[in-house]
Amino acid sequence: MIIDFGATPPVAALRMQAQAHLANYRRVYAASEKAAGRHEDTATLEGFLDACKTAGIGKTVIKARDIETTFGGKIRNEDVADLCRAYPDHFIGFAGVDPHKGMDAVRELEHAVRTLGLRGLNLQCFENRIAIDDRRMYPLYAKCVELDIPVNIHTGINFSLKSSPDFGRPEMLDRVLCDFPELRAIASPPGWPWIMELISIAWRQPNLYIGIVAVRPNLLVKPDSGYGPLLQYGRTLLQDKMIWGSAYPLMPIGRTLAELRALPLEASITAKWLGGNAKAFLRL
């Protein structure tokens, strides 16, 4: 089964309003977003689900976000949970909470998991303007361990001109996982331009996975792109830690899937990247 570890279906409640801080993303991803609209009839939820079926995708992870303190936006846990309940065989929901809200965020996370049925935590630290290893994050990590849920953490460059790239440095993940060795975490996107830094940490930390998300897979075979080590280590030492996601609507689902399948990987390793590793990470 193919698992898409990160897409946003065309549902109004999942499209955050007031995204002025992400305006530069529209410039950076303009061609890719145009291709997503051109290549696939995904203007409706039914069209999106049909595209997933055509691509052979059995599960899609959808993620809430709470950035009210910094940028006034929120994708509510309740709305993610509603979609998961409506399509329980297809969607897996991750909660989003605002670390600046302290214990209220911890309680919201517990409610999202125990009551709403969400299966993980999504943290976009550059949008919260908070470091991955900031002590204000630690109660959330501890709650993830207690609830036995994984956490998705944005790593690598961000293109917002209202935040700092430093919030995505992978090295901070190592400090967190040393303090929380039971925490299951995925670095997604995969840490560019600090690819080797992320690889060294994923090699060192048994519970850290790498998300091939929001990056065109063909960059892994392009000389001097900076992504090449992901292919080298991802087909050898880290083959059990690589997880694919389309990042739709930033990128077309079919195109990114085709590019990943075209990588020089053994069929058994491709199967791990496309679903086997995600199944283990999510404990499906």
Image: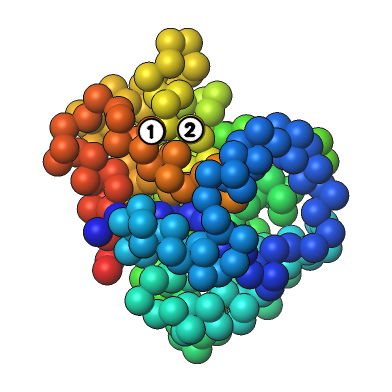
Nearer to the camera, 16 or 70: 16
Display colour scheme: rainbow
Task: Report helix, strand or loop for mark 1.
Answer: helix
Which numbered marker is on residue 15? none
* Residue identified by numbered label 1: 259
| CB-based contact (under 8 Å), mark 1 and mark 2 | yes
Q: Position of residue 33 (x, y in %)?
A: 64, 42
- Identify the residue shown where x is 74% and y is 40%: 26
Dividing the image into 4 quarters, which one contains the C terminus? Answer: bottom left
Q: In the rendered view, does 241 fall on the left or right side of 97?
A: left
- Identify the residue shown where x is 48% and y is 32%: 216
Give me the C-alpha separation between circle 1 and circle 2: 7 Å
Q: Compared to 265, does 64 lie above or below? A: below
Q: Residues within 10 Å of mark 2 (few under 14, many from 20)?
A: some
Task: Report helix, strand or loop for mark 2.
Answer: loop
Choose top left, top right, bottom left or bottom right for residue 166. Answer: top right
Q: Residues within 10 Å of mark 1 (few under 14, many from 20)?
A: some
Could you tell me the amino acid type at mark 2?
Arg
Q: Compared to 126, does 225 lie above or below? A: above
* Residue identified by numbered label 2: 216
